[in-house]
Image: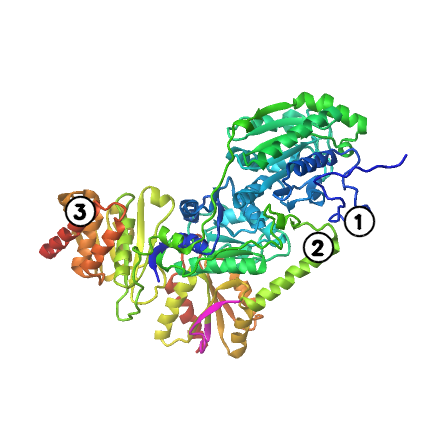
């Protein structure tokens, strides 16, 4: 009898990427299910007219070479990561049809997190999950879907749930999520099953053609080589044993009531980016080199919520307005969220070395722990400004300690929360930053630009503190 | 020209926006989290794509996906997260995909702490994942360079189709300084020669790092090495400060280099001939330039780094151990102090006399 070859649609006619002497034969073993599934997928891609748009993701496993066969854009990716890679492709190219093809080890073991999370985000992709209960490429090890009692090279006595747990049911897991549009489990064990599988595969790809979201098709498949079966045995294994553990059927099809997902185009215009940062109105002049300006190093510290970080930023802003070189560096992480926080500010006439103040010219301490922690690091001739509510405290020799009624000054002006601004007023009055009242006011306006109501209040607090300093110091 | 006070981490995102990067995928980790947060804030407004990934591995694989599609894509993390990403970085290098990864280094090993350190040098500069590959590694030392080197990173990534790492540290990420905003915004184009974008022009393309045939894979490895040689020839960048007549050469990058610069200025006032050599590219490492200095005069090299001599090894290799070398280092989240550097400078100067 003459051999008749029916060309597959959607697949290359010759598999040139495979090389070797048989350019029309696949690399799969006789009796393997991958060939049938490839054919069904290729045919659907062709019939739906999506080959130009398709990005096929080959997994790690026996289908690592799926790109030998599919006539579309192809990616080969790391074990288990196809849904993450697919997410990247889909977000970058809204019109792309993303197809992930994964085995049981890839999808349900090393890539379980990626699988669930991509499904939960409802990524626009079709995931084809080939479940044959065994690792194929690596030589027949236990898979997350290996049946209870089934022997593999890593459960030679048969899978024992007491040691190995139970088979994972991926359709059921994914069916717990809100986002997926389509979930179905099919089999390719024999002709009648293949017909149903064909339908499910087409449905999943139709959903991709229409950009409607996430589709998951689990396909019970055969691996005669690793399970030591002949063709007949492998069909029976799928029909009689696998189906019992993994019941076939549609879990969900919301395609008809789902609208396509359309993502916006990226904007690259410079003006659009400039506007995000208000470059027209919110820019400062550049710093001017002035080696005669003595560098000032400031440490501000207090409880979280006392505004020490924003006080530091305001000083930096004031320096920036005055065309000085400035830097600000906060304590960060857990410190920021509880207990004490602190920041370093440097104002200089030249480019700044370390932004981290080890020895300060000025320490502003809003609470006792901060005072005790940093007082010893103040340089001789330096200042310690602390809130007068801290009470009696020892100031190192050669350092000027000033108890400032900052909370009271701020409270009298309208809000105790502005005590940090009162400290700025003291610095201004003492002239220890080399910055002017104008600089500080402009900086306060910038700091509170998001809450403009607070600007006048803070200006008043600044002035009250200056008056207090002039009267009392 | 527009200047604003900006945090280092934010500057990296600003750089990405002007560099035409339209995809950001990341996972939270201190002290790099603001990069993720700022990307989530700014990218969607411009229609650009942002996903907070479920893991560092997923983030780097999303990068692989968007890079495969030919887009400009960025991710960021810190030591423990960079370790997790290494699998993906190896695949990116193997598939010759361009991307920018920002590493805001923190102290290790293990969970360590969130303080600044430079202990990722080896895992980033020498590769880190499996296989014979290299990242291009840029080392900023200011908020300005956090922005500028992300932009430069995208140019290099696409020029060589290679991952680029911007290797910074907790201080650079967290500090605020003046930033002069970029004057140009890049309008990116997809290279249909190799990208797989789900378009008719790219239908025949394949992005892959698998070569079944040993000789083919070996040849590919040789091609990669040739690429790295070209990068070594073309892309070395460094800054030197008063090295011309110096008999003590500090070698330092990142935040440590700023402390060194202050130390050099101070020691010069004391009459000590000391200079600072700052690599701006760590791969390619400015080996030839260091060797020239070593060959030109008697001098001592001091590697100043917040790690256990990881860069010192490269300094010794560069000068082929022809001159004495010393190490000034801190670890565990501690910064090098100017006094610590000065002490070493004075000690070496005293021994010279």
Looking at the image, residue A335 sits to the left or right of residue A163; the answer is left
Marks 2 and 3, how far apart at CA: 70 Å
Query: Mark 2 highlights which residue?
Result: B217
Looking at the image, residue B192 sits to the left or right of residue A472; the answer is right
Query: Which mark is drawn over residue B196?
Result: none
Q: Quadrant of the C terminus of chain B?
A: bottom left
Q: x%, y% of residue B233?
A: 58, 68
What secondary structure predominates along the stretch shown in magenta?
loop
Count how many numbered circles sit on residues in the image: 3
Q: x%, y% of residue B347?
A: 42, 70
Q: Which residues are magenta?
A: B236-248
B129 inside magenta stretch = no
Task: Residue at 23%, 52% (x, y): give it.
Answer: A444
Query: Which mark is drawn over residue A20?
Result: 1
The local crowd at label 1, few if under 14, some if 14 to 19, many if 20 or more residues have their Cα within 10 Å, is few
Marks 1 and 2, how far apart at CA: 17 Å
The local crowd at label 2, few if under 14, some if 14 to 19, many if 20 or more residues have their Cα within 10 Å, is some
Q: x%, y% of residue B309?
A: 51, 60
Secondary structure beneath dot 1 equals loop
Task: Residue at 73%, 21% (x, y): give it.
Answer: A240
**The furthest residue to the left:** A471
Q: Quadrant of the N terminus of chain B?
A: bottom left
Tell which subunit mark 3 falls on.
A
Query: Mark 3 highlights which residue?
Result: A457
Task: Residue at 52%, 41% (x, y): give it.
Answer: B55
Q: Are marks 2 and 3 on the same chain?
A: no
């Amino acid at each position: 009898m003459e051999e008749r070859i029916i060309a597959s649609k959607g697949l290359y006619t010759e598999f040139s990427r495979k090389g070797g002497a048989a350019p029309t034969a696949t690399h799969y073993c006789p009796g393997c299910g991958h060939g049938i599934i490839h054919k069904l997928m290729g045919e659907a891609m062709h019939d739906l007219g999506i080959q130009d748009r398709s990005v096929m993701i080959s997994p790690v496993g026996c289908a690592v070479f799926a790109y030998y066969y599919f006539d579309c854009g192809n990616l080969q990716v790391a074990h288990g990561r196809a849904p993450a890679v697919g997410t990247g492709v889909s977000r970058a190219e809204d019109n792309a049809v993303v197809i992930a093809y994964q085995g049981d080890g890839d999808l349900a073991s090393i890539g379980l997190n990626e699988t669930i999370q991509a499904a939960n985000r409802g990524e626009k992709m079709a995931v084809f999950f080939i479940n044959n209960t065994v690792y194929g490429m690596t030589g027949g090890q236990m898979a997350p879907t290996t049946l209870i009692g089934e022997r593999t090279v890593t459960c030679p006595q048969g899978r024992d749930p007491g040691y190995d747990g139970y088979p994972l049911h991926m359709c059921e897991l994914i069916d717990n999520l809100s986002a997926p549009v389509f979930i179905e489990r099919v089999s390719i064990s024999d002709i009648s099953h293949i017909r149903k599988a064909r339908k499910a595969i087409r449905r999943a790809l139709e959903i991709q053609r229409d950009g409607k979201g996430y589709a998951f098709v689990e396909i019970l498949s055969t691996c005669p080589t690793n399970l030591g079966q002949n063709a007949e045995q492998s069909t029976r294994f799928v029909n009689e044993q696998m189906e019992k553990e993994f019941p076939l059927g549609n879990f969900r099809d919301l395609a008809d009531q789902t609208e396509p997902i359309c993502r916006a185009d990226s904007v690259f215009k410079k003006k659009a980016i400039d506007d995000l940062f208000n470059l027209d109105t919110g820019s400062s002049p550049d710093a001017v080199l002035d080696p005669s300006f003595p560098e000032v190093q400031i440490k501000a510290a207090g409880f979280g919520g006392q505004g020490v970080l924003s006080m530091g930023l305001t000083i930096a802003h004031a320096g920036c307005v005055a065309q000085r070189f400035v830097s600000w560096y906060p304590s960060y992480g857990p410190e920021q969220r509880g207990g004490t926080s602190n920041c370093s500010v440097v104002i200089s006439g030249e480019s700044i070395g370390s932004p981290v103040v080890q020895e300060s010219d000025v320490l502003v301490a809003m609470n006792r722990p901060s005072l005790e922690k940093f007082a010893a690091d103040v340089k001789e001739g330096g200042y310690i400004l602390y809130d007068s509510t801290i009470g009696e405290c020892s100031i190192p020799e050669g350092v000027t300690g000033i108890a400032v009624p900052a909370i009271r000054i701020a409270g009298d002006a309208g809000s105790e929360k502005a005590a940090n601004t009162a400290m700025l007023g003291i610095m201004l009055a003492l002239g220890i930053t080399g910055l002017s009242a104008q600089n500080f006011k402009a900086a306060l306006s910038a700091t509170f630009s998001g809450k403009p109501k607070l600007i006048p209040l803070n200006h008043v607090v600044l002035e009250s503190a200056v008056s207090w300093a002039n009267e009392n110091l | 020209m527009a200047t604003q006070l900006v945090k280092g981490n934010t500057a990296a995102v600003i750089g990405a926006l002007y560099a035409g990067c339209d995809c950001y995928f990341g996972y939270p980790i201190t002290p790099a989290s603001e990069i993720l947060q700022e990307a989530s804030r700014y990218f969607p407004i411009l229609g650009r794509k942002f996903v907070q990934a479920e893991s560092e591995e997923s983030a780097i694989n999303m990068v692989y996906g968007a890079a495969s599609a030919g887009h400009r894509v960025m991710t960021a993390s810190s030591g423990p997260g960079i370790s997790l990403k290494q699998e993906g970085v190896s695949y990116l290098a193997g598939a010759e995909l361009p991307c920018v990864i920002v590493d805001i280094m923190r102290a290790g090993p293990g969970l360590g702490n969130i303080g600044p350190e430079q202990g990722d040098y080896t895992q980033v500069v020498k590769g880190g994942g499996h296989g014979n590959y290299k990242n291009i590694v840029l080392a900023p030392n200011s908020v300005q360079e956090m922005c500028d080197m992300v932009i430069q990173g995208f140019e290099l990534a696409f020029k060589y189709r290679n991952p680029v790492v911007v290797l910074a540290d907790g201080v650079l990420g967290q500090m605020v300084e003046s930033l002069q905003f970029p004057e140009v915004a890049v309008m990116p184009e997809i290279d249909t020669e190799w990208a797989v974008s789900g378009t008719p022009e790219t239908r025949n393309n394949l992005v892959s790092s698998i070569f079944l045939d040993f000789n083919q894979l070996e040849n590919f490895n040789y091609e990669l090495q040739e690429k790295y040689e070209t990068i070594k020839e073309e892309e070395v960048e460094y800054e030197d400060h008063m090295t011309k007549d110096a008999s003590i050469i500090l070698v330092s990058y990142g935040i440590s280099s700023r402390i060194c610069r202050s130390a050099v200025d101070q020691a010069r006032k004391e009459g000590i001939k000391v200079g600072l050599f700052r690599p701006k590219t760590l791969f390619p490492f400015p080996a030839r330039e260091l060797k020239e200095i070593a060959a030109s005069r008697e001098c001592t090299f001091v590697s100043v780094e917040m790690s256990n001599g990881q860069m010192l090894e490269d300094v010794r290799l560069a000068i082929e151990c022809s001159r004495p070398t010393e190490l000034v280092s801190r670890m565990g989240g501690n910064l090098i102090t100017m006094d610590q550097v000065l002490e070493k400078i004075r000690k070496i100067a005293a021994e010279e006399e």
